[in-house]
Image (tube, rainbow, N blue to C red):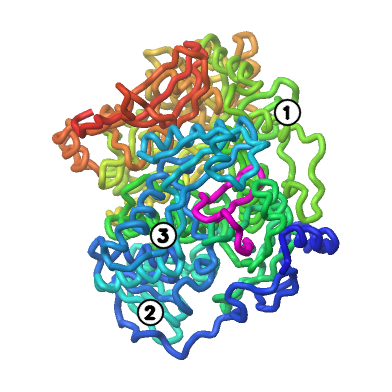
Amino acid sequence: MASLSRALRVAAAHPRQSPTRGMGPCNLSSAAGPTAEKSVPYQRTLKEGQGTSVVAQGPSRPLPSTANVVVIGGGSLGCQTLYHLAKLGMSGAVLLERERLTSGTTWHTAGLLWQLRPSDVEVELLAHTRRVVSRELEEETGLHTGWIQNGGLFIASNRQRLDEYKRLMSLGKAYGVESHVLSPAETKTLYPLMNVDDLYGTLYVPHDGTMDPAGTCTTLARAASARGAQVIENCPVTGIRVWTDDFGVRRVAGVETQHGSIQTPCVVNCAGVWASAVGRMAGVKVPLVAMHHAYVVTERIEGIQNMPNVRDHDASVYLRLQGDALSVGGYEANPIFWEEVSDKFAFGLFDLDWEVFTQHIEGAINRVPVLEKTGIKSTVCGPESFTPDHKPLMGEAPELRGFFLGCGFNSAGMMLGGGCGQELAHWIIHGRPEKDMHGYDIRRFHHSLTDHPRWIRERSHESYAKNYSVVFPHDEPLAGRNMRRDPLHEELLGQGCVFQERHGWERPGWFHPRGPAPVLEYDYYGAYGSRAHEDYAYRRLLADEYTFAFPPHHDTIKKECLACRGAAAVFDMSYFGKFYLVGLDARKAADWLFSADVSRPPGSTVYTCMLNHHGGTESDLTVSRLAPSHQASPLAPAFEGDGYYLAVGGAVAQHNWSHITTVLQDQKSQCQLIDSSEDLGMISIQGPASRAILQEVLDADLSNEAFPFSTHKLLRAAGHLVRAMRLSFVGELGWELHIPKASCVPVYRAVMAAGAKHGLINAGYRAIDSLSIEKGYRHWHADLRPDDSPLEAGLAFTCKLKSPVPFLGREALEQQRAAGLRRRLVCFTMEDKVPMFGLEAIWRNGQVVGHVRRADFGFAIDKTIAYGYIHDPSGGPA
């Protein structure tokens, strides 16, 4: 019987040839396909002999001719979605599985459930999964899901890691998740077999545990069937039927299988690794990749019984209790891509690559030394799907109405499945999820990225490799960069701009006074034979962000902020989404879409929200009324009827586009939505000196009387036509200049030249974050989300509730106002000069009453500022 120490020696003696030798980093695959023949140092494998699918003849039950919804894939997400659809009362729900339940990826998952993650939404999703698996399913069916509550232990080998765990514990307090920070000595008492000599401490969550994939999915299927849903195994899907309605909108019509077709208006793609192939059947892009993910199961270990599961993030290893043994796995920097995803693969495994897996063995032996002499009982190396931002892909595809995604779970499908299945079912039935799922919504990705192989591959690799990295508030990816660059990119790079990445866009973060820091081509962190970049200025500056204290460039950002408060700063905001809504029905559509009254005279600009049917905030943006024109220009299309120019945050531009498009389709509005985001640049000049500076550049009177706040005009700047808007997002006098792409550099240079004698400087989004929180301006997807209403967020002034004009979400707001608010957004300032970043629990009189959504340092007041939603623990009005 081989031991872990022998596996280390074998890997050292027989190094694996790089799969990319002579091919470059685009062919990072294993040479071997799925197999049941193992040529590695152990004796037995799980599911030995089941390398490929052997589908039984015919489906497990006859196919219905019609269904209200068809779920494709019988893994964790498919079964959870079907169960929750049935539980919410959806009749005519059918699940199609090409082989048997759990085949593909779910059957070999470790089944761990950790309750704490650095996201309030994910904590809620995990809590729901735990309730379903540990209690509700057994109460409903009398069947045990295989849930074992043995607790979870997070290992901190350095101070920063322990600080991260303390932040998780604070968030857990807001959601009633019991957790404790333990000293090394206390950890040793809890887990006697653990080496604690190199520990700073641990985070212990006693109600974490594990679940059995087969037991859970079988129980879910039986519970769903008892509520009228149908589960059909051995029925591969071969096609998705689509039709186009009278307005040119593509919609789902049915599902084709080897054994017949089902007419349905709704399909849910829960096909895991095979989700991209199912998407192609429908013309839908599904940005994920398949990789090998492995763990080994040890022989019996005396004294390991009842020990908690362990995550040693710094060693990139997890230890899952499996009876009287351990499963040992982790996330490496050189995972193996599965290039040719086989549709015949079901309960199969790959050969485990010991050279790749060695780092996990070393970390495991260091943490639990008895493993060095422990035998290996079996290995598991199977496929898992991973996404560019390590978050699942959910929601309705923008290309096809009625086609929903529930895939790309980055090996966390079991633990997130219950919460995500419930939200997906609510999405399908009620049009949106109950919780804020924007971070999972497929619409978060710009359409230019969702089928871009290099971006998907690089970002998915980095997300996998950094899965166990400390989550720092200002970290940035190194993969998939420079995909979308605005006209001022090179100009600002030469002036020391340190860029941030937001869904493909490079936007200014802050300005480094010591010169350029370009983002270089992705080096895969030196994996696959790639040469890691040396003397990489951008990466060095990024490393300074790896702290929960103030970074070294804190004072540089301070100078940008105080210059804006005292003189002026120029911000490149070209990455903003810039849309035109025009046509005969544009006014009617705008009245319904926007919460504020935007039907004002041409030349007006209005700050408004867009809501959903539940009164939640889908967006905040500015809407500028346009005068009709029969001749197109670079700053306005030709149109008849009414027209509006929309400016929305670039990070959420695709979400805004999709939301507006969906509403227009549902309303059958006769108008156009035109995306000019790539055609226009945008700079904003803010600060007390902004009028004096721009008066030298613009050919117009900028006085209060001639150019009032919240208005816009077409003007010339240094001879170039621009749309000037008098707006402020930092609380100072200021203007935005919306500029045709070709004119951006000369206009920017003219502004900088005019501002030289007034103290004008460049500033980035780190300054915007600080300046805006000082003013109390809301940031959509931080302190304003789809499950927050404008009333709760203090934005009632953006809602035309005093007018009789109906708008999307109005009824929900009126009901909420009549019933009284149960929570509200409030502001806090700290007397001590300490950094905060969000997710910290808010206490009042010894009780947790909420948690912080967003926090930053306000340099003008020299205090940390935080915003969070609070509620009355007794349930009364907030």
Mark 2: which amino acid?
A: Ile
Q: Position of residue 152 (x, y in %)?
A: 49, 47
The residue carrying pointer 1 sits among few (fewer than 14), some (14 to 19) or many (20 or more) residues within 10 Å by Cα, namely few
State how far apart marks 2 and 1 are (Cα): 60 Å
Instruction: Name the residue at the front extreme.
Output: 302
Q: Position of residue 395 (x, y in %)?
A: 40, 56
Is residue 311 inside the magenta stretch? yes
Q: Residue at x 17, y 32 (%)?
A: 820
The quadrant holding residue 229 is: bottom left
Mark 2: secondary structure: strand
2 or 1: tag closer to the N-terminus? 2
Mark 1: which amino acid?
A: Gly
Residue toward you, 103 or 258? 103
**Magenta stretch bounds:** 293-320
State how far apart marks 1 and 3 are (Cα): 57 Å
Q: Residue at x 53, y 63 (%)?
A: 109
Decide if residue 334 is on the left or right side of residue 113: right
Disc nearest the viewer among 2 and 1: 2
Mark 1: secondary structure: loop
Q: Which residue is mark 3?
A: 147
Q: Which residue is mark 2?
A: 232
Disc nearest the viewer among 3 and 2: 3
Residue toward you, 160 or 483? 160
The residue carrying pointer 3 sits among few (fewer than 14), some (14 to 19) or many (20 or more) residues within 10 Å by Cα, namely many
Is residue 774 inside the magenta stretch? no
Q: Residue at x 26, y 29 (%)?
A: 796
